[in-house]
């Protein structure tokens, strides 16, 4: 608006029309701490002219609100781009919605939350702006390149069309019960696990048992993603094995990887706890090969490319309503890992594609989380009622995993019991029971690999080719030109012909 009005000399009305047609807003999170609200004092000192323009945009916007909802002054206040309570601030998400012709979330459930909850007032003002674009991943990087043996095996059965038309993977459903194909898929997974194990030993100095279930959670460390809930499962497994060392269980290697933001104290504390739990578990002779815990340092795309092909179990356990989409979940699925997860983000659509028989879903739904918030969450209700919860929270609290510094994880236990915004203990029971089911199915390898094949065969929807096409046609009004171009994985030796 500043360039069009001040530099190019357009009228306000023409400039606004161009701006709104040019902008579209994709929301990526509903966590309030991540939605930026810039102090007007800061804008005033750095971008005074922009602030004037924002005030004028707001003036016209609030006139529209009053025209559509006469006398509804609460609504006008809620929808203002400028928040007057406390320090005066510009709500940047509100500015994005008003200045865009399209607004979208990145998975169906997230787009619904945007319409029904965080931006409900804006949805009522302009329902036609609101859309969904479910995220995707590129099958070139996340299968063809990172898992060539699986790619070859798939090509043997159904050809190579899937590389550019991922829905073709559906054809693999015909082979889900074929013992020869099952054996071949299993062999590829086993070889990939062996390769990861060798790399972990060489680069990280850790020894893992490649016959154990590779149970993996890799993603940025954040409280809403609930790496701590995974940690509570590890501690509970440890306590159960100690109580009954001869019980038959599926041996696991639990790997957790991810970076913490530099200023995020609790995320760093969670990493420290995972490492400390690993030190106790991995060195306990009674535990032996049944359970190993590894923190994967320096998680990044090049490491993800090694991990996805070797994973048996994908952990996608965020509190329902907090993960906008997730894409790690899709990478695991495409490489034949089974998912344990909540009905959150793209997990919902993954479950729909593969059917509930092929995924391990547990825990509260978005509605149940909302209900719990209304009733009031008290972690002590769960802590006092469930002796396994009490035991592991006490162990974190009293220094069982930090003998050199008994107070080391007191603050982590305090978060779990007093300040937990993500309701870990409310989902604990459902998570443990679901993990027991995972262990049982893993001990039936024919069943497990059949489910894995169904996962691969159902992942077509999650190609970024589909996502990009939807953005192009439904938000930007442009038709695909890729039919005139070489396939994305083919070398391009000359520039493509200009599109007419
Ligand atoms: C895919 C990917 C992510 C996203 O993972 P989520 O589980 O969806 O949060 C993060 N980091 C890296 C390196 C990735 O490859």
Image (cartoon, rainbow, N blue to C red):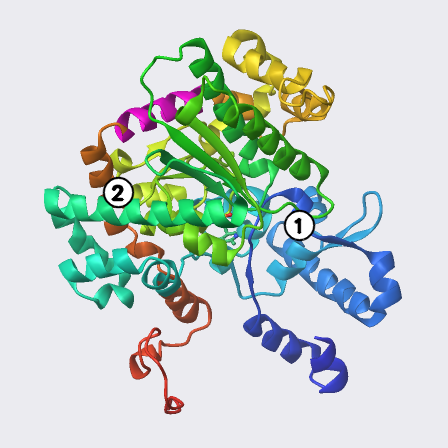
Residue 376: quadrant of the picture? top right
Please name the residue that numbered disc 2 is placed on: 452
Label at residue 58 = none
Quarter of the picture containing the C terminus is bottom left
State how far apart marks 2 and 1 are (Cα): 37 Å
Q: What span is colored magenta in the figure?
A: 429-442
441 up-or-down from 491: above or below:
above
Q: Is residue 178 visible to the viewer in this orientation of the structure?
A: no
- Labels 2 and 1: the sequence-earlier one: 1
Q: Is residue 14 left or right of residue 49?
A: left
Quarter of the picture containing the N terminus is bottom right
Closer-to-camera residue (137/324): 137
443 up-or-down from 286: above or below:
below
Please name the residue that numbered disc 1 is placed on: 35
Residue 266: quadrant of the picture? top right
Q: Residue at x 31, y 76 (%)?
A: 487
SS class, disc 1: loop
Closer-to-camera residue (92/398): 398
Q: Is residue 439 one of those drawn in magenta?
A: yes
Residue 179: quadrant of the picture? top left
Q: Is residue 485 one of those drawn in magenta?
A: no
Prevailing secondary structure class for the magenta stretch in the rendered image: helix
SS class, disc 2: helix
């Amino acid at each position: 608006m500043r360039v069009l009005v001040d530099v190019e000399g357009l009228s306000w009305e023409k400039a606004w029309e161009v701006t709104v047609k040019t902008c579209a807003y994709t929301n990526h999170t509903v966590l309030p701490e991540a939605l930026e609200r810039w102090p007007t004092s800061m804008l005033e000192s750095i971008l005074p002219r922009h602030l004037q323009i924002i005030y004028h945009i707001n003036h016209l916007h609030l006139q529209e609100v009053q025209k559509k909802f006469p006398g509804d002054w609460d609504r006008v206040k809620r929808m203002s781009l400028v928040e007057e309570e406390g320090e005066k601030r510009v709500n940047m998400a509100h500015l994005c919605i008003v200045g865009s012709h399209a607004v979208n979330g990145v998975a169906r459930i997230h787009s619904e939350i945007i319409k029904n909850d965080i931006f409900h007032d804006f949805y009522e003002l302009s329902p036609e702006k609101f859309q969904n674009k479910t995220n995707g991943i590129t099958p070139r990087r996340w299968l063809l390149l990172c898992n060539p043996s699986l790619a070859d095996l798939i090509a043997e059965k159904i050809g190579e069309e899937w590389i550019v038309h991922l829905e073709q993977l559906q054809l693999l459903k015909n082979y889900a019960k074929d013992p020869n194909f099952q054996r071949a898929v299993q062999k590829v997974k086993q070889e990939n696990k062996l390769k990861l194990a060798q790399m972990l030993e060489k680069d990280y100095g850790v020894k893992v048992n490649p016959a154990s279930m590779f149970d993996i959670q890799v993603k940025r460390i954040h409280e809403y993603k609930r790496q701590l809930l995974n940690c509570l499962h590890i501690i509970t497994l440890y306590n159960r094995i100690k109580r009954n060392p001869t019980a038959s269980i599926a041996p696991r290697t639990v790997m957790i990887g991810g970076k913490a933001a530099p200023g995020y104290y609790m995320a760093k504390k969670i990493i420290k706890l995972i490492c400390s739990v690993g030190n106790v578990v991995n060195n306990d002779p009674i535990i032996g090969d049944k359970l190993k815990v590894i923190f994967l340092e320096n998680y990044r795309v090049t490491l993800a490319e090694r991990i996805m092909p070797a994973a048996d179990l994908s952990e996608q356990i965020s509190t329902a309503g907090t993960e906008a989409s997730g894409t790690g979940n899709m990478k695991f699925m495409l490489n034949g890992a089974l998912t344990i997860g909540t009905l959150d983000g793209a997990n919902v659509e993954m479950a729909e594609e593969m059917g509930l028989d092929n995924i391990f879903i547990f825990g509260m739904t978005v509605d149940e989380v909302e209900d719990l918030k209304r009733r009031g969450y008290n972690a002590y209700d769960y802590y006092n009622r469930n002796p396994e919860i009490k035991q592991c929270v006490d162990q974190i609290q009293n220094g069982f995993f930090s003998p050199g510094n008994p107070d080391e994880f007191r603050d982590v236990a305090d978060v779990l019991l007093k300040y937990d915004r993500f309701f870990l203990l409310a989902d604990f029971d459902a998570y443990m029971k679901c993990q027991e089911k995972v262990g049982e199915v893993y001990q039936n390898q024919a069943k497990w690999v059949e489910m894995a094949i169904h996962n691969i065969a159902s992942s077509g929807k999650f190609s970024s080719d589909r996502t990009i096409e939807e953005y192009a046609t439904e938000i930007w009004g442009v038709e695909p030109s890729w039919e005139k171009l070489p396939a994305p994985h083919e070398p391009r030796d000359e520039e493509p012909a200009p599109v007419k």
